[in-house]
Image (cartoon, rainbow, N blue to C red):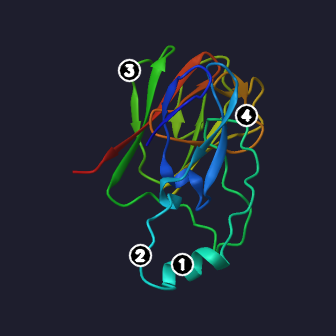
Amino acid sequence: MIIECTSCHARYQYDEERFERKPSKKIKCAKCQSIFEIRNPAFAPKPEPASGDSTAARFAKTHTQTPVPEDTTAQAPLPQKEDTGPVPTAQLPAGRRLSIAIIAGADAGTVYRFEKPLITIGRSGADLIINDSEASRQHAAIEVRDQVVLLEDLKSTNGTLVDGSRVTEPVELQDKSEFQIGSTTLMLIVTEDS
């Protein structure tokens, strides 16, 4: 879905799965930094039937919406810690191909295709080796849990940056998300497997 900042009218692509079955979320605009609320289309009010007390009407009367905690970033919030059953294990998504493209730096133009759900990126001894003296040997890791892709810094010397901010805990990446290791800029690419 397309969302629009209520202040500066910047438009963003927002994955509806990030609502995590909540009626709305508060988002911080990456352009003007104002916070605005977006509504989950799955919770849009449905017209009630004209006849008596339907199942939908009874459900609406007994289920009220709870306040939504503020989500301070428009970039990939982590799932809330709530008991929703077993935690998804690391696995590549069915029907999708994941790749990392190096878009700036000494290795610009290189594309690495995921063959396993957990890869490391670094200067040496990693799954994806980058030619960057500012990168640590084992700099960062990317773990794929079906549809969720998490980037984690491995206590590197110079840190891993997403949107100019240093990563201090695992961060969810979306298709076309960019991140920086040393002087190398990388991008996650998700494509449908034909």
Q: Nearer the viewer, residue 122 or 102?
A: 102
Q: Nearer the viewer, residue 34 or 127?
A: 34
> In this figure, which residue is indicated by the disc labeled 2?
49
SS of the residue under disc 4? loop
Query: What's the residue at 56%, 19% (across, down)?
Result: 184
Looking at the rendered structure, the kind of residue marked 4 is Val
Q: Earlier in the sequence, mark 3 or mark 4?
A: 3
Looking at the rendered structure, the kind of residue marked 3 is Gly
Question: For the residues marked 2 and 3, what is the alpha-carbon distance in whole angstroms?
Answer: 57 Å
SS of the residue under disc 2? loop
**Is residue 146 among the parts visible in the rendering?**
no
Q: Earlier in the sequence, mark 4 or mark 2?
A: 2
Looking at the rendered structure, the kind of residue marked 1 is Ala
SS of the residue under disc 3? loop
Question: Would you place residue 86 above or below residue 6 in this image?
Answer: below
Within the image, what quadrant is residue 153 found in? top right
Within the image, what quadrant is residue 160 found in? top right
> In this figure, which residue is indicated by the disc labeled 1?
57
Asked whether, in this view, residue 169 is left or right of residue 6, the answer is right
